[in-house]
Image: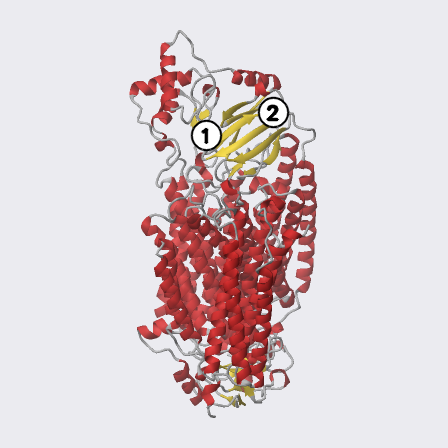
Amino acid sequence: MSDISMTHAPTSGAAVRPSPLPVGSIGHKASGWWGMLTIILTEGSLFSYLLFSYYYFAVQYGREWLPSEPPKFRLSLPNTIILIVSSVVVWWAERGAKRGSWGQLVLGLLGGFILGCVFVVIQLFEWKDKPFTYASSAYGSLYFTITGFHMAHVVAGLVILLMLLVWSLMRYFDSERNAPVSIGAIYWHFVDVVWLTVFFSLYITPYLG
Amino acid sequence: MTYLRTFGGFKGEQIKVLTWALLIQAIVVVVIVSLLVLIGVLLRRSRRPATGLDRQPVQETGSGLSWIYIGVGISTIALIGSMIWNGYTMAAIDRPPRAPELTIEVRGHQWWWEVRYLSQDTSRIFETANEIHIPVGQPVEFRVSTVDVIHSFWIPALGDKIDLIPNQINSNWLEADSPGIYRGQCSEFCGQQHAHMGLVVVADKPADFQAWWDSQLQPAALPADQPQVAEGATQFVLRCGACHNIRGTQAGGRLGPNLSHLMSRKSVAAGTLPNNPAYLSGWIADPQTVKPGNLMPNLDLSGPELASIRTFLEAQK
Amino acid sequence: MAVGTYERAPTLERADYASPVASELETIWETKPGIGGWLSTVDHKELGIRYIATAFAFLILGGIEALVMRVQLARPNLSLLTPEQYNQIFSMHGITMIFLYAQPVLTGFSAYLFPLLLGTRDLAFPRLNAFSYWAYLAAGLFMYASFLVAAAPNDGWFNYAPYSLKTYNPGPNMDFYALGMILLGISTTAGAINFLVTVLRTRAPGMSINRLPILTWGTTTTSVGILLSMPAVTLACFMLWADRQFGTHFFDATARGQPLLWQHLFWIFAHPWVYIIVLPAMGIVSDALPIFCRRPLVGYTVVVLGTIATMVMGFGVWLHHMFATGIPFIALSFFSGASFVITIPSAVAVFAWVATIWTGRPVITTAFLFFAGFISMFVIGGVSGVMTASVAADRQLTDTYFVVAHIHYVLIGINLFPVIGGLFVWFPKMTGRMLNERLGKWSFWIILCGFNLAFLPMHWTGLAGMPRRIYTYQDGMGWNTVNLVTSIGAFFLALGILLVLINIFLSVRNGAVAGPNPWDGPTLEWVTPSPPPPYNFAVIPAVASRHPLWEDRLREGMGHSSVHRGLVLDDGKEMLATTVLDAEPDAILKMPEDSYSPLVVAVVMTAGFAGLLLHWWVFSGICAWLMFMGLLVWLWPEPKLGQSARWDR
């Protein structure tokens, strides 16, 4: 056995000085924050495989694969804007948490939650509007699977926002201890960014080329 | 079925030589590295007893990096050499040296092969199953697809395989450089009887090939002097005709193999049994024992029914 | 110091395992005895061993399936099994070995070793670790439950559509596969997240990324690989299940679906998966072989870069499983080239190991034999892989027994050999007792001979044209002798594995007592007693080199590592968070107590999947709701864990 530290005091290479360290979950030092980043990495690749499948079909069949009537913007465009606004609102809430502004935190989370719910409702109408179903064609299967997976992530995000709201109302967070807010917020931003790629692929590419 | 020997003409030769070269290179690499490990262990092993490793000194003698530089350097050269050779071969065999005169369509079924000979002259187009004749010394194009699951069309002695994919027509070309019978087999897992989805390619001299083609175009043989054959034909249409087809009779089924000129083939049940009366009877009487799970049902034929159907089939030369 | 401040300066003290600090930590970290403790524990050592034991149980099941197949194939035209039984058994053999043994066993080693190697007290998410173990066990049982209704998956581990669709496969076989794979994917993803965050955030101070043991590099790299590749197969399985149950048209060719989309999604996942189940095993060798060569690994940096390069390139070669599917020439050329090039980083590792032997003084132990044997087996699996990289050759080789031989050299040669070697190295750490060396050497020679007797001739079987996945073959094809030899070899291999298991059972009670560092190893796990206490380290060690226990003999590093004098973290369950690159102390993490919630969530989730299988939609809905409630309990911000502000009011 070689326990060198018995004979040598620690010097430069392994110098650890007992300086003050934050305790528990603090912002981006929290393990949960890093865990959420890894979840986003894997969920992001899930959506890239969904879009890969969509483009795979598009390459195989070309334009004839698309439904006769290209996707409409009447509901989808406003809905996209709603989702972007909700992201901004949640970001504002998170800033509130960091500033210690309880009101801004609660209001922002509530706003984000409501806007998210509006998105879900409009998206349900958009689904109802479609002349095809998930079982009527390969396009229908992909359209509903991609938007369905996204919808599931929106719902998960809404649950997270709701729980953050509840915890905020219970005064769980202050200006320093609010890591769960950051963790939930980054997930919500991720869901929004994913929507932009979905929106581009399903709604805009049919009009290109 | 081995592909370390080839009868596949230019293409077969290209693939065979490359495969051998890669194989030998592989063996050489394995031997060298294994010897390096073995000699290294024998030469360098510590002579002290293995117990109590803390009594064995720890030291970093040399960085050892030159091993990696030299070893990886040589490996890279060998790999790039193989890559270039492979690329050259791929390009060389991608298209036949001259345009194929003959195109054969092959469609996979669970668990047999539907074969269709194409021709400019529509009267010469015909269908057969499980046995393909080709003329020697000519590249032949195969256009393959499937009616159900994925299969793979493979005649090892002639060349490489190509998968049969639903909704997709793949093509491959093969050539036989000498007359002979070359066995092939489905090589993509396709269900219960994947093991018994064989086929046979017969390479004929061009004149023999044309004669064979001509004979295949003949309608079913119903010799007037053999009433048992006529009786068998009736039974066949009744009991087998929903699935099988014999040109010149009312048996027009499309679910099973086309049995026109059955006795000209070397095997039955997709390369599973030799084609002689005994095996043929056994197969018709009890296909579920020969190929369990295959799509041909046991028909519970009576002895006389079986005999007359067999007699009819035996006349289909 | 009072719980309730946001900041604390931990003291720097000297403490060994007999100090008062140690006994205090023992009370804080220990798992309660009894069944309750067993079900709720989050101790990474307990879970790591459980992972390894479970993986070995699946190895035995998969091995029995292999032996049954080898009896069936020993002679031509045997009918021990019906075609359907054979198809189910070969499918479950592949699924078991590839998904339920090869990766989980490495997860077990990593779960056990990560905190010990990194100088910390647990993984970053201990409850997630427990969850991923339970979910793994549940996924394995879920898939094996299919045998109870005689409807095991029957379309191979690769499971190509459209044979897997309802038209051709009406039973529940493929639903077991699709749902079971999704379940297992959740477990694997959870494990990968855990390893990644652990290695990024919870290393001992001073363990900068150029000082990480190679095993942790291997597992970290593959964890990223899992996060990026797993969703492909999860999605493919979801699509398959939807095609089968809800009439969608992803793979259904009769309605313009694309059967080849399955193959793309599957191999985008499954080719990286091959590296996922070998890179950590290569890491085991890179870390443990040098112990017996009495010198550091040759070429640490290039081996690490090679590991990463292999994983990155592993995402660019999936098409080489599809060379015969009618891919355009240009794509064939690219993927063929990439498949050649991916060999280069592996060659780096091979020559690093050879150089380590040549420039060291190897001590011949059982573990060393397994590692040295591994190098040869690795090369055989590698060069046969090079042959399949050539499109021209591969369109003859693919789907023959040549590829079966190749995959077994990869899986047994590159996974099982290092795993058994690693078991000999770390069994003393896990149990406090040595495995029997004499019996171990016997088992090595029997495994080496049996393995090569079984699989070396199999290359020939393939070159002689025998296709894969056939339940029998005809006489007179020239395949009889090689198949008989393979069958005999398989039983020898099984005998060798059996000897290893016997060795484990005998040694766990009666083996020689190991002491903390029986091999005089260089890394931090050898500082702890064997077996380590629940808290691993009495004080958090500080690291100044790659080989803290060898550094004075090697004159390595700038300063000196300090393993018995370090930061004291004893205010409840605590770990140190460090910065990503340099591993400077960054925060004090509050760690969770043992908890039932991982078990409950895993059980409820599995029940929900069973409901999906049985079409009990309402039941599955209830399970989803219960799962949500379980997660809520799990994730509820706890004052004790420093997650909410209330704890200091």
Of C131 and A39, which appears nearest the observer? Answer: A39
Mark 1 packing: few (<14 Cα in 10 Å), some, or many (20+)? many
Most distant residue in the top direction: B225
Residue ID at (44%, 66%): C132
Q: Which residue is mark 1?
A: B270
Cα–Cα gap, marks 2 and 1: 24 Å
Task: Give the image's coloring scheme.
Answer: secondary structure
Of C273 and A59, which appears nearest the observer? Answer: A59
Q: Which secondary structure lies at badge 2?
A: loop
For marks 2 and 1 on the same chain, the one whose residue lies earlier in the sequence: 2
Chain identifier of the residue bearing label 1 in the image:
B
In the rendered structure, which amino acid carries the disc numbered 2?
Answer: Ser
Residue C211 location in percent, x, y?
A: 60, 73
Of C418 and B271, which appears nearest the observer? Answer: B271
Q: Which secondary structure lies at badge 1?
A: loop
Most distant residue in the bottom direction: C1
On the image, which quarter does residue B6 sit in? top right
Q: Number of numbered discs present?
A: 2
Residue A41 visible in rendering: yes
Chain identifier of the residue bearing label 2 in the image:
B
Q: Do the CB atoms of the residues marked 2 and 1 lie less than 8 Å apart?
A: no
- Looking at the image, residue C94 lies above or below residue C122: above
* Left or right of residue C219: residue C105: left
In the rendered structure, which amino acid carries the disc numbered 1?
Answer: Ala
Residue C620 location in percent, x, y?
A: 37, 60
- Looking at the image, residue C467 lies above or below residue C28: above
Q: Which residue is mark 2?
A: B178
